[in-house]
């Protein structure tokens, strides 16, 4: 199992990064690069879709935290989509539900950006 | 009194490189699935082992002379003990190229300690190794 990263830009300055597979110490640098590239190109409102992520570790969490920080430094934001209870539990255990806005659907996440 | 001999032992050795952490996760998935753990408990063990291997790799930070990471899974009727042995760094290393190494290490520690029932660590400078030992009990 590897990681697939697919990015769409539903409107100007907004990107949805859909991840599928495993976000771990091996694959997370790709997520970081995608986020950094988008921010450097002026896309500051990001939604990361974790719906199809089957595995997420502390490295993946670190990349998401870094992405949120970088986006906010540019007056943007990073929101998450996730309905997988296993993945949601990892955010709860680590207390990260307090810093991330996590939604069940893309429509809801985009509306709150 | 020393612990009695386990019913079975599975050993695995992986290179200290990120691309092999998934191999360790797959192996532990196979071991834990043969025991009376629930699906969620098996997933907890898998994540804890992945974190333990990642921590080892982060600590060594690409040290080309690092020995492999050795995992020993000691299977008992009521528990699974996993020992993750890795090299101690040969010399002080620069911080790893990660978002925030300390924050990630903190997250990793939290995950391992919450997901497993018992966790302890030991440095053995005379052998040049670091040991992380984790235990998960079956239906406690």
Image: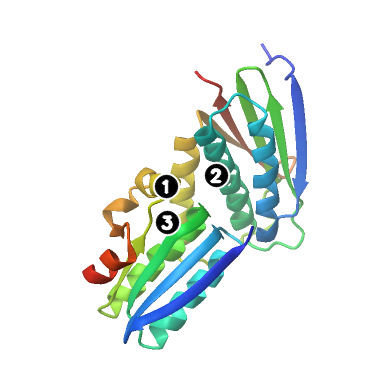
- How far from the left and from the top, in percent, is residue A31? 50, 70
Q: Secondary structure at mark 2?
A: helix
- How far from the left and from the top, in percent, is residue B136? 56, 28
Quarter of the figure with residue B31:
top right
Q: Are marks 3 and 2 in contact (CB under 8 Å)?
A: no
Height in image: B119 above or below A113?
above
Residue sitting nearer the eye, B30 or B82: B30
Q: CA distance from mark 1 to mark 3?
A: 15 Å
Q: Are marks 1 and 2 in contact (CB under 8 Å)?
A: yes
Chain containing the residue with disc 2: B
Q: Are marks 1 and 3 in contact (CB under 8 Å)?
A: no
In-image side of A69 versus B113 (left or right):
left
Q: Are marks 1 and 3 on the same chain?
A: no
Q: Secondary structure at mark 3?
A: helix
Sequence-earlier tag: 3 or 2: 2
Q: How dense is the environment of label 1, judged by Cα within 10 Å: few (below 14), some, or many (20 and up)?
A: many
In-image side of B101 versus A12 (left or right):
right
Chain containing the residue with disc 3: B
In-image side of B53 versus A13 (left or right):
right
Residue under label 1, please give it: A90
Q: Secondary structure at mark 1?
A: helix
Residue under label 3, please give it: B103
Quarter of the figure with residue B52:
top right
Residue ID at (44%, 75%): A35
Residue sitting nearer the eye, B75 or B33: B33
């Amino acid at each position: 199992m590897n990681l697939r990263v697919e990015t769409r830009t539903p409107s100007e300055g907004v990107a949805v990064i859909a991840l599928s597979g495993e976000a771990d110490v091996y694959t997370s640098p790709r997520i970081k690069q995608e986020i950094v590239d988008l921010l450097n190109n002026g896309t500051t409102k990001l939604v990361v879709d974790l719906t199809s992520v089957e595995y997420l570790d502390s490295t993946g969490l670190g990349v998401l935290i870094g992405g949120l920080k970088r986006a906010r430094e540019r007056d943007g934001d990073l929101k998450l989509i996730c309905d997988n209870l296993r993945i949601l539990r990892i955010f709860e255990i680590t207390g990260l539900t307090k810093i991330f806005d996590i939604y069940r659907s893309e429509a809801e996440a985009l509306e709150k950006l | 009194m020393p612990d009695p001999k386990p019913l079975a032992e599975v050993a695995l050795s992986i290179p200290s490189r990120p691309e092999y952490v998934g191999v360790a996760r797959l192996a532990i998935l196979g071991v834990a699935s043969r025991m009376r753990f629930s699906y969620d408990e098996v997933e907890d063990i898998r994540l804890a082992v992945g974190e333990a291997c990642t921590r080892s790799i982060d600590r060594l930070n690409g040290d080309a002379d690092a020995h492999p990471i050795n995992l020993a899974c000691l299977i008992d009727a009521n528990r699974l003990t996993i020992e993750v042995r890795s090299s101690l760094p040969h010399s002080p290393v620069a911080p790893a190229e990660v978002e925030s190494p300390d924050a990630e290490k903190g997250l990793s520690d939290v995950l391992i300690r919450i997901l497993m029932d018992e966790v302890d660590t030991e440095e053995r400078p005379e052998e040049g190794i670091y040991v992380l030992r984790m235990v998960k009990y079956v239906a406690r």
